Image (spheres, grey):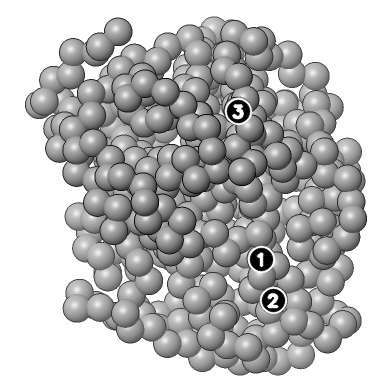
Amino acid sequence: MRYPLSLSTLSTVATLVVNLSQLIDPAKAAATASCSALPSSPSLHTIANVLPDPFAWYPAPTPSGRVSTLSDWQCHQSQLSTVIQQLELGTKPPSPSTVSSSYNVSGSSGTLEITASNNEGNISFSVGIQYPSSGSGPFPAIIAYGGPSIPIPSGIATITLDNGAIAAQDDASSRGKGLFYTLYGSDSDAGAMIAWAWAVSVIIDRLEATPDSNIDTTKLGVTGCSRNGKGALVAGAYDSRIALTIPQESGSGGSACWRLSDAEEGAPQDVQTASEIVQENVWFSTSFNTFANNDTNLLPFDHHQLAGLIAPRALFFIDNSGYEWLGPWSSWGCNLASHTIWQALDVPDNMGFSMSSNHPHCSFPSEQEADLDAYIGKFLLGQSTNTSIMSNYGGVDFPEAQWVNWTVPDLSS
Ligand code: MCU
Protein backbone atom coordinates (compact mmCIF):
# COMPACT_ATOMS: atom_id res chain seq x y z
CA MET A 1 0.00 0.00 0.00
CA ARG A 2 1.32 3.44 -0.87
CA TYR A 3 1.50 5.78 2.12
CA PRO A 4 0.28 9.34 1.58
CA LEU A 5 3.48 11.28 2.23
CA SER A 6 3.10 14.88 3.22
CA LEU A 7 5.97 16.96 1.89
CA SER A 8 5.78 19.32 4.82
CA THR A 9 6.11 16.65 7.48
CA LEU A 10 8.42 14.44 5.51
CA SER A 11 10.56 17.12 3.92
CA THR A 12 13.80 15.34 4.71
CA VAL A 13 12.58 12.22 3.04
CA ALA A 14 11.08 14.02 0.07
CA THR A 15 14.33 15.77 -0.74
CA LEU A 16 16.45 12.65 -0.68
CA VAL A 17 19.29 13.13 -3.08
CA VAL A 18 21.65 10.24 -3.00
CA ASN A 19 25.17 10.85 -4.00
CA LEU A 20 27.21 7.69 -4.04
CA SER A 21 30.34 9.77 -3.65
CA GLN A 22 29.17 10.32 -0.05
CA LEU A 23 29.90 6.72 0.72
CA ILE A 24 32.39 6.75 3.53
CA ASP A 25 33.76 3.30 3.14
CA PRO A 26 36.31 3.16 0.32
CA ALA A 27 36.24 -0.63 0.16
CA LYS A 28 32.51 -0.62 -0.34
CA ALA A 29 32.66 2.27 -2.79
CA ALA A 30 35.16 0.37 -4.92
CA ALA A 31 32.99 -2.72 -4.81
CA THR A 32 30.06 -0.71 -6.08
CA ALA A 33 31.59 1.05 -9.05
CA SER A 34 28.87 -0.41 -11.27
CA CYS A 35 26.08 0.21 -8.77
CA SER A 36 23.51 2.65 -10.09
CA ALA A 37 22.53 5.73 -8.11
CA LEU A 38 19.62 5.55 -5.72
CA PRO A 39 16.31 7.06 -6.80
CA SER A 40 16.30 10.72 -5.78
CA SER A 41 12.77 10.84 -4.34
CA PRO A 42 11.61 7.35 -3.50
CA SER A 43 8.06 6.80 -2.30
CA LEU A 44 7.96 5.25 1.10
CA HIS A 45 5.66 2.35 1.81
CA THR A 46 4.21 0.92 4.94
CA ILE A 47 5.88 -2.33 5.91
CA ALA A 48 3.89 -3.52 8.94
CA ASN A 49 3.66 -6.66 11.07
CA VAL A 50 6.70 -8.08 9.32
CA LEU A 51 10.34 -6.99 9.11
CA PRO A 52 11.54 -5.58 5.77
CA ASP A 53 13.03 -8.21 3.47
CA PRO A 54 16.78 -7.46 3.64
CA PHE A 55 17.23 -8.89 0.16
CA ALA A 56 14.64 -6.69 -1.58
CA TRP A 57 16.08 -3.86 -3.66
CA TYR A 58 15.65 -0.42 -2.12
CA PRO A 59 13.09 1.12 -1.93
CA ALA A 60 10.96 -1.98 -1.45
CA PRO A 61 8.59 -2.93 -2.90
CA THR A 62 9.70 -0.97 -5.99
CA PRO A 63 11.73 -1.65 -8.01
CA SER A 64 10.47 -5.14 -7.64
CA GLY A 65 12.89 -7.98 -7.27
CA ARG A 66 15.52 -9.15 -4.89
CA VAL A 67 19.28 -9.23 -4.93
CA SER A 68 20.59 -12.51 -6.27
CA THR A 69 24.39 -12.29 -6.56
CA LEU A 70 27.27 -11.19 -4.39
CA SER A 71 27.79 -8.08 -6.48
CA ASP A 72 24.06 -7.25 -6.20
CA TRP A 73 24.40 -7.59 -2.45
CA GLN A 74 27.43 -5.29 -2.30
CA CYS A 75 25.52 -2.68 -4.28
CA HIS A 76 22.46 -3.02 -2.05
CA GLN A 77 24.60 -2.85 1.08
CA SER A 78 26.23 0.39 -0.11
CA GLN A 79 22.86 1.90 -0.90
CA LEU A 80 21.54 1.00 2.53
CA SER A 81 24.64 2.42 4.15
CA THR A 82 23.71 5.76 2.57
CA VAL A 83 19.97 5.49 3.24
CA ILE A 84 20.46 4.66 6.93
CA GLN A 85 22.65 7.73 7.28
CA GLN A 86 20.02 9.88 5.57
CA LEU A 87 16.99 8.66 7.46
CA GLU A 88 18.32 7.67 10.86
CA LEU A 89 21.92 8.42 11.81
CA GLY A 90 23.04 11.50 9.90
CA THR A 91 26.11 11.86 7.72
CA LYS A 92 29.49 10.42 8.59
CA PRO A 93 32.07 12.77 7.05
CA PRO A 94 35.31 11.41 5.63
CA SER A 95 38.35 11.78 7.87
CA PRO A 96 39.46 15.44 7.88
CA SER A 97 42.25 16.39 5.51
CA THR A 98 44.53 17.64 8.26
CA VAL A 99 45.11 15.14 11.02
CA SER A 100 48.20 14.38 13.06
CA SER A 101 48.92 12.38 16.16
CA SER A 102 51.58 11.82 18.75
CA TYR A 103 52.11 8.54 20.52
CA ASN A 104 53.58 8.04 23.97
CA VAL A 105 54.14 4.83 25.87
CA SER A 106 54.99 4.17 29.47
CA GLY A 107 55.20 0.57 30.65
CA SER A 108 52.09 -1.26 29.53
CA SER A 109 50.07 1.91 28.84
CA GLY A 110 50.13 4.19 25.86
CA THR A 111 48.39 7.36 24.71
CA LEU A 112 47.54 8.40 21.18
CA GLU A 113 46.86 12.13 21.05
CA ILE A 114 45.06 13.15 17.88
CA THR A 115 44.73 16.66 16.44
CA ALA A 116 42.38 17.29 13.55
CA SER A 117 41.42 20.46 11.76
CA ASN A 118 39.41 21.80 8.85
CA ASN A 119 38.34 25.28 7.86
CA GLU A 120 35.78 25.31 10.70
CA GLY A 121 38.11 24.61 13.58
CA ASN A 122 40.73 22.57 15.30
CA ILE A 123 40.29 19.80 17.90
CA SER A 124 42.40 17.41 19.96
CA PHE A 125 41.42 14.24 21.71
CA SER A 126 43.34 11.29 23.05
CA VAL A 127 42.75 7.58 23.53
CA GLY A 128 44.39 5.44 26.18
CA ILE A 129 45.90 2.10 25.16
CA GLN A 130 46.30 -0.66 27.72
CA TYR A 131 48.66 -3.36 26.42
CA PRO A 132 48.70 -7.02 27.46
CA SER A 133 51.15 -7.68 30.28
CA SER A 134 53.08 -10.20 28.20
CA GLY A 135 53.87 -10.87 24.56
CA SER A 136 55.57 -8.66 22.02
CA GLY A 137 52.83 -7.59 19.59
CA PRO A 138 51.63 -6.21 17.31
CA PHE A 139 48.56 -6.86 19.46
CA PRO A 140 44.93 -7.23 18.47
CA ALA A 141 42.88 -4.52 20.18
CA ILE A 142 39.33 -3.73 21.24
CA ILE A 143 38.19 -0.13 21.06
CA ALA A 144 35.81 0.40 23.99
CA TYR A 145 33.47 3.34 24.33
CA GLY A 146 33.98 4.60 27.87
CA GLY A 147 36.11 1.54 28.72
CA PRO A 148 35.19 -2.12 28.43
CA SER A 149 32.44 -3.82 30.45
CA ILE A 150 33.19 -7.25 29.00
CA PRO A 151 36.10 -9.45 30.10
CA ILE A 152 38.93 -8.94 27.61
CA PRO A 153 40.99 -12.13 27.17
CA SER A 154 44.75 -11.97 27.61
CA GLY A 155 46.77 -11.09 24.54
CA ILE A 156 44.45 -8.24 23.50
CA ALA A 157 45.01 -4.51 24.01
CA THR A 158 42.20 -2.20 25.06
CA ILE A 159 41.79 1.26 23.52
CA THR A 160 39.47 3.52 25.51
CA LEU A 161 37.59 6.32 23.77
CA ASP A 162 35.73 8.99 25.71
CA ASN A 163 32.96 9.05 23.12
CA GLY A 164 30.94 11.59 25.11
CA ALA A 165 33.69 14.16 24.47
CA ILE A 166 33.34 13.60 20.72
CA ALA A 167 29.54 14.02 20.80
CA ALA A 168 27.73 14.64 24.08
CA GLN A 169 24.91 12.29 25.11
CA ASP A 170 23.69 13.74 28.40
CA ASP A 171 20.11 14.33 27.30
CA ALA A 172 18.09 15.99 24.55
CA SER A 173 19.96 19.27 25.10
CA SER A 174 23.21 17.62 23.93
CA ARG A 175 22.38 18.14 20.25
CA GLY A 176 25.38 19.56 18.38
CA LYS A 177 27.68 19.54 21.42
CA GLY A 178 31.13 17.95 21.47
CA LEU A 179 34.39 18.07 19.55
CA PHE A 180 32.93 16.62 16.34
CA TYR A 181 30.65 19.64 16.01
CA THR A 182 33.58 22.06 16.35
CA LEU A 183 34.70 20.71 12.97
CA TYR A 184 31.33 20.07 11.31
CA GLY A 185 29.10 22.73 12.88
CA SER A 186 26.51 22.51 15.65
CA ASP A 187 23.86 22.31 12.90
CA SER A 188 25.43 19.14 11.40
CA ASP A 189 22.82 16.47 10.68
CA ALA A 190 25.01 13.87 12.43
CA GLY A 191 23.58 12.29 15.56
CA ALA A 192 25.99 11.37 18.35
CA MET A 193 26.47 7.74 17.24
CA ILE A 194 27.67 8.52 13.72
CA ALA A 195 29.94 11.21 15.18
CA TRP A 196 31.52 8.59 17.44
CA ALA A 197 31.90 6.28 14.42
CA TRP A 198 33.75 9.09 12.64
CA ALA A 199 36.15 9.32 15.61
CA VAL A 200 36.74 5.56 15.51
CA SER A 201 37.71 5.81 11.83
CA VAL A 202 40.12 8.66 12.60
CA ILE A 203 41.66 6.58 15.41
CA ILE A 204 42.15 3.63 13.06
CA ASP A 205 43.72 5.95 10.46
CA ARG A 206 46.22 7.12 13.07
CA LEU A 207 46.94 3.62 14.37
CA GLU A 208 47.69 2.56 10.79
CA ALA A 209 50.03 5.55 10.47
CA THR A 210 51.77 4.74 13.77
CA PRO A 211 53.39 1.28 13.58
CA ASP A 212 55.18 2.09 16.87
CA SER A 213 51.83 1.82 18.62
CA ASN A 214 52.25 -1.95 18.23
CA ILE A 215 48.56 -2.53 17.40
CA ASP A 216 47.54 -5.00 14.70
CA THR A 217 45.00 -2.93 12.77
CA THR A 218 43.79 -6.03 10.91
CA LYS A 219 42.54 -7.42 14.24
CA LEU A 220 40.40 -4.67 15.73
CA GLY A 221 37.21 -5.03 17.72
CA VAL A 222 34.77 -2.40 18.98
CA THR A 223 32.48 -2.63 22.01
CA GLY A 224 30.35 -0.63 24.41
CA CYS A 225 27.40 -1.29 26.69
CA SER A 226 23.86 0.07 26.62
CA ARG A 227 23.85 3.46 24.84
CA ASN A 228 27.51 2.80 24.02
CA GLY A 229 26.51 -0.63 22.72
CA LYS A 230 24.19 1.05 20.22
CA GLY A 231 27.17 3.18 19.28
CA ALA A 232 29.49 0.18 18.91
CA LEU A 233 27.05 -1.33 16.40
CA VAL A 234 27.15 1.87 14.33
CA ALA A 235 30.97 2.05 14.47
CA GLY A 236 31.21 -1.53 13.20
CA ALA A 237 28.68 -0.84 10.46
CA TYR A 238 30.56 2.21 9.19
CA ASP A 239 34.19 1.09 9.08
CA SER A 240 35.10 -2.10 7.25
CA ARG A 241 38.48 -2.22 9.02
CA ILE A 242 36.75 -3.41 12.20
CA ALA A 243 37.06 -7.18 12.30
CA LEU A 244 34.69 -7.86 15.22
CA THR A 245 31.80 -5.77 16.54
CA ILE A 246 30.52 -6.57 20.05
CA PRO A 247 27.47 -4.49 21.08
CA GLN A 248 26.57 -5.28 24.69
CA GLU A 249 23.00 -4.81 26.00
CA SER A 250 22.35 -2.24 23.28
CA GLY A 251 18.57 -2.82 23.21
CA SER A 252 16.29 -0.49 21.25
CA GLY A 253 18.37 1.60 18.90
CA GLY A 254 20.94 -1.20 18.78
CA SER A 255 20.31 -4.93 18.53
CA ALA A 256 16.51 -4.46 18.64
CA CYS A 257 14.33 -3.66 15.62
CA TRP A 258 12.10 -0.56 15.77
CA ARG A 259 9.02 -2.42 14.54
CA LEU A 260 9.52 -5.20 17.07
CA SER A 261 10.08 -2.81 19.96
CA ASP A 262 6.83 -1.04 19.03
CA ALA A 263 5.07 -4.42 19.02
CA GLU A 264 6.63 -5.44 22.35
CA GLU A 265 5.83 -2.18 24.15
CA GLY A 266 2.58 -1.89 26.06
CA ALA A 267 1.30 -2.86 29.48
CA PRO A 268 2.53 -4.81 31.29
CA GLN A 269 5.74 -4.43 29.24
CA ASP A 270 7.71 -1.19 29.40
CA VAL A 271 9.98 -1.23 26.37
CA GLN A 272 11.92 1.64 24.83
CA THR A 273 10.54 2.67 21.45
CA ALA A 274 11.69 5.03 18.71
CA SER A 275 9.18 7.67 19.81
CA GLU A 276 10.64 7.64 23.32
CA ILE A 277 14.29 7.46 22.28
CA VAL A 278 14.24 10.62 20.15
CA GLN A 279 12.83 12.58 23.09
CA GLU A 280 15.41 11.21 25.48
CA ASN A 281 18.73 11.81 23.76
CA VAL A 282 20.61 12.80 20.60
CA TRP A 283 21.94 9.45 19.42
CA PHE A 284 20.13 9.81 16.08
CA SER A 285 19.88 12.49 13.42
CA THR A 286 16.87 14.79 13.64
CA SER A 287 15.86 13.27 10.27
CA PHE A 288 14.81 10.19 12.23
CA ASN A 289 12.14 12.16 14.16
CA THR A 290 9.84 11.95 11.15
CA PHE A 291 9.65 8.18 11.48
CA ALA A 292 9.98 7.94 15.26
CA ASN A 293 7.19 10.42 15.92
CA ASN A 294 4.85 9.17 13.17
CA ASP A 295 5.26 5.60 12.08
CA THR A 296 8.31 3.33 12.16
CA ASN A 297 6.50 1.10 9.63
CA LEU A 298 7.43 3.73 7.02
CA LEU A 299 11.14 3.18 7.49
CA PRO A 300 12.42 1.33 4.42
CA PHE A 301 14.75 -0.70 6.65
CA ASP A 302 15.01 -1.88 10.25
CA HIS A 303 17.94 -2.66 12.49
CA HIS A 304 18.60 -6.14 11.12
CA GLN A 305 19.75 -4.22 8.05
CA LEU A 306 21.94 -1.84 10.05
CA ALA A 307 23.56 -4.97 11.51
CA GLY A 308 23.79 -6.38 7.98
CA LEU A 309 26.11 -3.54 6.92
CA ILE A 310 28.74 -5.43 8.91
CA ALA A 311 28.38 -8.69 6.95
CA PRO A 312 30.46 -10.68 6.10
CA ARG A 313 32.64 -9.33 8.92
CA ALA A 314 32.06 -10.67 12.42
CA LEU A 315 29.32 -9.46 14.75
CA PHE A 316 28.48 -10.79 18.20
CA PHE A 317 25.49 -9.38 20.11
CA ILE A 318 25.38 -9.73 23.89
CA ASP A 319 21.85 -9.20 25.23
CA ASN A 320 20.07 -9.41 28.62
CA SER A 321 16.60 -10.95 28.85
CA GLY A 322 16.05 -9.55 32.35
CA TYR A 323 16.02 -5.86 31.49
CA GLU A 324 12.62 -5.23 29.91
CA TRP A 325 13.40 -1.66 28.78
CA LEU A 326 15.98 -3.04 26.30
CA GLY A 327 13.28 -5.00 24.46
CA PRO A 328 14.78 -8.50 24.74
CA TRP A 329 12.03 -10.05 22.60
CA SER A 330 12.69 -7.40 19.97
CA SER A 331 16.45 -8.00 20.10
CA TRP A 332 16.12 -11.76 19.82
CA GLY A 333 13.80 -11.51 16.83
CA CYS A 334 15.95 -8.85 15.19
CA ASN A 335 19.06 -10.99 15.69
CA LEU A 336 17.35 -13.95 14.02
CA ALA A 337 16.49 -11.68 11.10
CA SER A 338 20.05 -10.32 10.87
CA HIS A 339 21.46 -13.80 10.85
CA THR A 340 19.75 -14.57 7.54
CA ILE A 341 22.15 -12.07 5.91
CA TRP A 342 25.23 -13.96 7.07
CA GLN A 343 23.50 -17.19 6.02
CA ALA A 344 22.98 -15.81 2.52
CA LEU A 345 26.68 -14.92 2.32
CA ASP A 346 27.53 -18.46 3.42
CA VAL A 347 29.30 -17.27 6.58
CA PRO A 348 26.62 -18.03 9.21
CA ASP A 349 29.24 -18.46 11.93
CA ASN A 350 30.47 -14.89 11.52
CA MET A 351 27.36 -13.59 13.30
CA GLY A 352 26.21 -14.82 16.69
CA PHE A 353 24.12 -13.70 19.63
CA SER A 354 23.78 -14.57 23.25
CA MET A 355 20.71 -13.71 25.34
CA SER A 356 21.48 -14.02 29.05
CA SER A 357 19.09 -14.74 31.86
CA ASN A 358 18.37 -11.86 34.21
CA HIS A 359 21.34 -9.98 35.65
CA PRO A 360 22.23 -6.36 36.48
CA HIS A 361 22.57 -4.13 33.41
CA CYS A 362 26.09 -4.07 31.91
CA SER A 363 27.57 -6.48 34.46
CA PHE A 364 28.74 -9.28 32.23
CA PRO A 365 27.47 -12.68 33.49
CA SER A 366 29.71 -15.75 33.52
CA GLU A 367 27.11 -17.79 31.56
CA GLN A 368 28.01 -15.78 28.42
CA GLU A 369 31.77 -15.96 28.81
CA ALA A 370 32.41 -19.03 26.63
CA ASP A 371 30.30 -17.49 23.83
CA LEU A 372 32.24 -14.23 23.97
CA ASP A 373 35.60 -16.00 24.17
CA ALA A 374 34.74 -18.05 21.08
CA TYR A 375 34.10 -14.88 19.04
CA ILE A 376 37.16 -13.01 20.30
CA GLY A 377 39.24 -16.18 19.94
CA LYS A 378 38.35 -16.71 16.29
CA PHE A 379 38.21 -13.16 15.00
CA LEU A 380 40.89 -11.39 17.02
CA LEU A 381 43.24 -14.15 18.16
CA GLY A 382 43.09 -16.42 15.11
CA GLN A 383 41.91 -19.50 17.03
CA SER A 384 39.74 -22.27 15.58
CA THR A 385 36.77 -21.86 17.89
CA ASN A 386 33.16 -22.81 17.20
CA THR A 387 31.25 -19.56 16.65
CA SER A 388 27.92 -21.09 15.66
CA ILE A 389 26.27 -19.39 18.64
CA MET A 390 22.65 -18.45 19.24
CA SER A 391 22.46 -18.90 23.01
CA ASN A 392 19.07 -18.29 24.55
CA TYR A 393 19.77 -18.61 28.30
CA GLY A 394 16.84 -16.27 28.95
CA GLY A 395 14.39 -18.49 27.06
CA VAL A 396 12.98 -15.73 24.86
CA ASP A 397 10.21 -17.06 22.64
CA PHE A 398 9.84 -15.31 19.26
CA PRO A 399 7.39 -16.14 16.42
CA GLU A 400 10.04 -16.10 13.71
CA ALA A 401 7.82 -17.32 10.87
CA GLN A 402 5.55 -14.29 11.30
CA TRP A 403 8.17 -11.53 11.27
CA VAL A 404 10.99 -13.08 9.24
CA ASN A 405 8.95 -14.19 6.24
CA TRP A 406 11.56 -14.18 3.45
CA THR A 407 13.56 -16.92 1.83
CA VAL A 408 17.32 -16.72 2.06
CA PRO A 409 19.07 -16.42 -1.32
CA ASP A 410 22.53 -17.79 -2.02
CA LEU A 411 24.71 -14.69 -2.35
CA SER A 412 28.03 -16.43 -1.93
CA SER A 413 29.12 -15.71 -5.52
C1 MCU B 1 20.14 0.73 26.94
O1 MCU B 1 20.69 2.01 26.67
C2 MCU B 1 20.19 3.17 27.31
C3 MCU B 1 18.72 3.32 27.08
O2 MCU B 1 18.47 3.39 25.68
C4 MCU B 1 18.23 4.59 27.73
O3 MCU B 1 16.83 4.73 27.61
C5 MCU B 1 18.58 4.63 29.19
O4 MCU B 1 18.28 5.91 29.67
O5 MCU B 1 19.97 4.45 29.33
C6 MCU B 1 20.46 3.22 28.82
C7 MCU B 1 21.92 3.24 29.15
O6 MCU B 1 22.72 3.70 28.38
O7 MCU B 1 22.24 2.81 30.36
C8 MCU B 1 23.59 2.89 30.78
| 195 left or right of 216 in image | left
Residue located beneath label 2 in the image: 216
**Three-letter amino acid code of the residue under disc 2:** Asp
Is the CB atom of the residue marked by disc 3 within 8 angstroms of ligand 1's nearest atom? Answer: no
Q: Write down the quadrant of residue 210 in the picture.
A: bottom right
- Which residue is at a point 89% across and 51% down the rendered structure image? 385
The residue shown at (43%, 45%) is 75
- Work out whether residue 273 can be spotted: no
Secondary structure category for the residue under label 1: strand
Q: Position of residue 241 (x, y in %)?
A: 57, 64
> Which amino acid type is shown beneath numbered disc 3?
Pro
Q: Which residue in the protein does label 1 denote?
A: 220
* Marked residue nearer the N-terminal end (1 or 3): 1
- Tag in front: 1 or 3: 3
Q: Which residue is mark 3?
A: 409
Percent from the top left, x then y, of residue 298?
33, 21
Quarter of the figure with residue 409: top right
Separation of marks 1 and 3 at Cα, in angstroms: 30 Å
